[in-house]
Amino acid sequence: MRILAIADIDDLRWKGGSGQADLLISCGDVSDPVILAAAEAYQCSQIYAVKGNHDFPAPFPPPIIDLHLHVDPYGGMAFGGFNGSWKYKSRGHYLYGQAEAMDLMKGFPPVDIFIAHNSPRGIHDKMDGIHAGFDSLTAYIHSAKPRLLIHGHQHLNIETQFAETKVLGVYGHIVIEV
């Protein structure tokens, strides 16, 4: 399966070219028109997304499927997700305290591919007071053992093997084979 993964795109137009992918995954901080244009440019038959800390508090338009605290099957695999980042400022959308994120993730079922805006704590963190990961996602990796966790927020294209999970940070867009 080919996946086009996108995150943290400030442009209001898709500038990532075209190609072929089965599925588009948006890890947040991408406008809905850019998500839809990217899916069209890559001929994606399915679109999954989570909101980032800079996204507006409105539902995604169809056919985008919001994976925040939701599981959806596609291509013989289970996909799930979590939106937002840790609460590094007093106001804003999709900001969670560490304990709040832990409570929300409690009992989330195992999935093959987990999509998040924020990274797991201790993996791809930046020491700037803003780009720290969620403890709940690190705990989820230990308990649920997803094959792949894809995140944005850190503005890094980076891959790290953590326990049994490949953690993939996306900035802009990448195409991956699963």
Image (cartoon, rainbow, N blue to C red):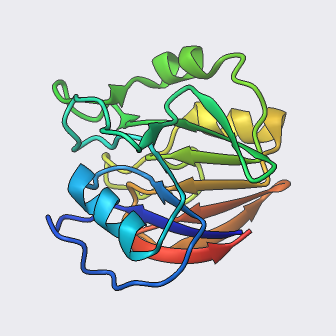
Q: How many marks?
A: 0
Q: In the drawing, does residue 30 fall left or right of residue 176?
A: left
Q: In the drawing, does residue 50 fall left or right of residue 106?
A: left
User: Which quadrant of the rendered structure holds the C terminus?
Assistant: bottom right
Q: Position of residue 78 (x, y in %)?
A: 74, 41
Q: In the drawing, does residue 177 fall left or right of residue 29?
A: right
Vertical relation: 100 (above or below) 19: above
Q: Position of residue 79 (x, y in %)?
A: 66, 42
What residue is shown at x 55% (from left), y 73% (from top)? 158
Q: Quadrant of residue 40?
A: bottom left
Q: Position of residue 113 (x, y in %)?
A: 69, 49
User: Which quadrant of the rendered structure holds the N terminus?
Assistant: bottom right
Q: Quadrant of residue 121?
A: top right
Residue 120 visible in the snapshot: yes
Q: In the drawing, does residue 137 fall left or right of residue 148?
A: left
Q: Residue 96 versus residue 80: which sits nearer the camera?
A: 80
Vertical relation: 56 (above or below) 113: above
Vertical relation: 42 (above or below) 55: below
What residue is shown at x 69% (from left), y 23% (from top)? 108
What residue is shown at x 32% (from left), y 46% (from top)? 129
Vertical relation: 125 (above or below) 129: below
What residue is shown at x 26% (from left), y 50% (from top)? 32
Q: Quadrant of residue 62?
A: top left
Q: Position of residue 137 (x, y in %)?
A: 62, 38
